[in-house]
Amino acid sequence: MIEADGLEKRYGEFIAVDNISFVVNEGEVFGFLGPNGAGKTTAMKMIQCVSPKNKGKLEVFGMDVSTDQRKIKRLLGVVPQESNLDPDFSVYQNLLVYSRYFDIPQKKAENIIDELLDFVMLKEKKDTLITLLSGGMRRRLLLARALVNNPRLLVLDEPTVGLDPQARHLIWEKIKKLQSLGNTIVLTTHYLEEAERLCDRLVIMDNGKILVEGKPSELIREYIGTEIVEADNNPAVLDCLNKTSSKFEVVGDTIQVYTDDPQAVMNALLKECDFGKVIVRRATLEDVFLKFTGRKLRD
Amino acid sequence: MSYFDVPKLTGSLWKVWFRNKDVFMKTIIVNFIPSFAQPLLYLFAFGFGVGNSINVMEGVSYIRFIAPALIAFGIMDASFFECTFGSYVRMYYQKTFDAIIATPLSIEEVIAGELLWGATKSVINSIIMLPIFAIFGIIDFPSSLLIIPFSFLAGLLFAAIGMCFTAIVPSIDSLNYPTFLFITPMFLFSGTFFSLSLMPDFIRYFALAVLPLTHVVIIIRSLTLSQPNPLMLFSFAWIFLATLLFFVLSINLMKKKLIV
Ligand SMILES: Nc1ncnc2c1ncn2[C@@H]1O[C@H](COP(=O)(O)OP(=O)(O)O)[C@@H](O)[C@H]1O
Ligand SMILES: [Mg+2]
């Protein structure tokens, strides 16, 4: 579906996307995970053919984004990071006007729109102006708008940013549903839970580069282990852990031991060291993310 | 990418026109009031105010002299404001252009559609204004009917000039400068309220060389008085070439601004 090789994007001197390569296969949900400013949106814009690349190869549906924009865009559905619904129109008119851009005849468009409003549960908001919709409703309408042309590929840029848990779960449910119907979906997010739940495969990006790629569960197993044992950070524990061959990291006033066998680590700690409290928890994608992108604050 | 690349356009650009038309139709009554009220206000102020002290200008009554200028100004006003403030709001605040270029339409087509819509606003304005002037009996028919098709070309010119400003200003507030530095002088020095022949040579030549409204006034005055001005063909050619130039330039400027 998408093939990128050595893809690069500059804004003046600044390199926003730095030599990235990835492949998105038909039918999968592929995630771009990364902190703010990682270059996710920039990558999405190149895929959507609205921002020209500077270097490398980028093909969507086997077509070059620099030459076949119109054909690619016809087969693409896009939910942008920032809502660009038309405030001059109602919910229904937004979809109708948008369907025109895809040359969908009005009669057919009206049927599609009815179905889509059902799908995103906005039927009773049909005649409401955009400015009167909640954040969650806007996101759902954006999703419906992206589906108007029955796209082969959906690009969702932070589909749940700023939503409350209910609204977020609803969007997740819709994304799952779309995947089960055979859609290919590319999404960006900085919510780890979202990526872990939705993505078949993902890349973690930072500073324009791809740091790691894989299936969420494999990434966790490979880089963290299935479990994490957290203990208080004190010299005795550190000393003790240094004697064993455990993988661990000091995070503020706790020590995290990465392991597939928490029982053994616990026993070792209990037997040989003097320590305060110990917690065992499942390793998550968040641990992988923090390991790769560090704990430095972003803005 | 140069400033004068010929834009690749398809019929899809009319979808942008339709989008703007649909919005216009939603508030059609409100949209008509300014088109209606503005020429009337000017007519009363200048026609009856100034007209009482100036009886004749270029051999016609003062009110018949300024009527075509008011029509020309209405045509300019409609498309210039549509493609400055109107387009700026759609581009920057509403992100309408961003939404449209995610569909098969290109940015060139979006801007071309905006320009054609701007020109259409001028046509609508002239259609509203003509009956008012007709009621006062100060424009001649049937020649004045030609103003309607002509207002599309003239409107397109001011739409394109406006769009160039929209592409280069750093913020919406800066759009007040072209209004002040371009529209206001033209309003006064384009043979609108005073005959160009009363002006010093340098103003006359300046007006003929670079002020688009001068040429629009020449043509419209020829039509309302049904007296062809010797400069009419020259003015038409001037408008035609300038429209072509600014049409292409504005599209390229907008492309440079929005496609980064
Ligand atoms: N139009 C632009 N001009 C200059 N810099 C930009 C532009 N768009 C994005 N950037 C910069 O590129 C980097 C990546 O941005 P973006 O792709 O939006 O990141 P993300 O979506 O991962 O948060 C950021 O540092 C951002 O400031
Ligand atoms: Mg982003």
Image (tube, coloured by chain):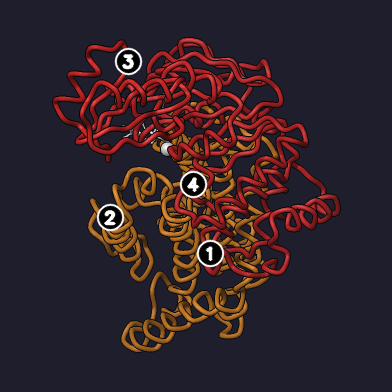
Chain colours: A red, B orange
Q: CA distance from mark 4 to mark 3?
A: 80 Å
**Quarter of the image containing the N terminus of chain A?**
top right
Q: Chain of mark 3?
A: A
C-alpha span from label 3 to label 2: 63 Å
Dot placed on the residue nearer the N-terminal end, 3 or 1? 1
Compared to residue A205, the image places residue B134 above or below, namely: below
Q: Can you tell which of label 4 and label 1 is closer to the viewer?
A: 1
Q: Amino acid at mark 4?
A: Ile
Between residue B195 and residue A59, name the one nearer to us.
Answer: A59
- Label 1 – label 2 distance at C-alpha: 33 Å
Q: Check disc 1 and give the amino acid type.
A: Ser
Provide residue B39's location: percent of width, then percent of height. 47, 77
Give SS at disc 4. helix
Q: Disc 3 designates what residue?
A: A246
What is the three-letter code of the residue carrying label 2? Ser
Q: Secondary structure at mark 2?
A: helix
Residue shown at the point (45%, 20%) measured from the top left = A261
Q: Secondary structure at mark 3?
A: loop
Mark whose residue sits in front, 3 or 1:
3
